[in-house]
Image (spheres, rainbow, N blue to C red):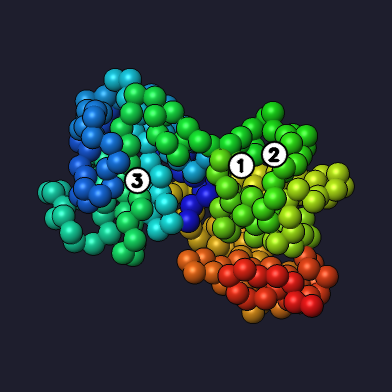
Amino acid sequence: MPELPEVEALKDFLAEHLAGRRVVRVLPVAISVLKTYDPPVTAVEGSEVTAVRRHGKFLDLETSGGLHLVTHLARAGWLQWKDRLPDGLPRPGKGPLALRVALETGEGFDLTEAGTQKRLAVYVVRDPQEVPGIARLGPDPLAAGFDESCLAALLKEERRQLKGALRDQSLIAGVGNAYSDEILHAAKMSPFKLAASLTPEETARLYEALRTTLTEAVERSRGLAAGRLKAEKKSGLRVHGRTGEPCPVCGDTIREVSFSDSSLQYCPTCQTGGRPLADRRLSRLLK
């Protein structure tokens, strides 16, 4: 799933390639991708893109007509830039293509989604706050005003485990499964530690890990073409998706806890005092 660093990089890439250019066609290939119908998605045709913004994991294309084309790539969605779009119309139901946006220059992009779970979402709204997922977003962890005291206030009453708290978009915007693993590894904290139990020193450590991990990931992705962002994300991860590999910090074997629809990775030596976590849905530290 694209998370804050990849969406930030996509925002910068699209701002460079779209700003000031006119949209001539928006073609939904999979109707399921459209989450709003009034205004219709075709209402942005003929308008120029005036700005590209990020809200958490949402991409927002603001147009001169006062409308916003907002996208959430979900778990298996991606944006593919085309210097020259193919001639002719794509056939619905064939392949992963969900929506195509064409510019007057002949350039444009495709939104694609792999797999059978269709969660890719496109909205056309007059105000981004009309998108329910944006309206409920918590603060952006890379915002200038997001300091250690902000994080402490957010976690103070949280009775959930840190892994779940970090992934909650209404608490902190933009962090998903991969970067929550990376942040907790950098902070040397168990994913199942209760958020409200953090001491001031632990909160400071988590804040530093949060800001540093995300900032470094953004810097690694900055300036890359859209097609290279997935590979860059994977290459930069130290524990997520690396079950069975040695921890780059201590050399211990990276372990995994699997859930019904996801998994997490961690290092026992760095994060849980050498004790493995039980691999079941309601995991607890083994005695």
Task: Return the residue at label 1.
Answer: 172
Question: Mark 1 or mark 2: which is in front?
Answer: 2
The location of residue 168, given as percent across then percent down, is 57, 47
Q: Residues within 10 Å of mark 1 (few under 14, many from 20)?
A: some
Going by the numbered disc 1, the residue's amino acid type is: Ile
Q: Are marks 1 and 2 in contact (CB under 8 Å)?
A: yes
Q: How far is disc 3 from disc 1 in space, using C-alphas?
A: 20 Å
Going by the numbered disc 3, the residue's amino acid type is: Ala
Task: Return the residue at label 2.
Answer: 154
The location of residue 43, given as percent across then percent down, is 22, 28
Residue name at image x 80 percent, y 51 percent: 197
Q: Is residue 21 above or below residue 278?
A: above
Question: Mark 3 or mark 2: which is in front?
Answer: 2
Residue 139 is left or right of residue 147, and the answer is left
Label placed on residue 219: none
> Mark 2 falls on what kind of element?
helix
> Mark 1 falls on what kind of element?
loop
The location of residue 15, given as percent across then percent down, is 43, 33
Q: Residues within 10 Å of mark 3 (few under 14, many from 20)?
A: some
Residue name at image x 74 percent, y 72 percent: 285
> Mark 3 falls on what kind of element?
strand
Going by the numbered disc 2, the residue's amino acid type is: Leu
Q: How far is disc 3 from disc 2 in space, using C-alphas?
A: 28 Å
Task: Return the residue at label 3.
Answer: 121
Residue name at image x 65 percent, y 70 percent: 283
Q: Is residue 56 visible?
A: yes
Q: Is residue 147 above or below residue 112?
A: above
Residue 98 is left or right of residue 57, and the answer is left
Residue 134 is left or right of residue 235, and the answer is left
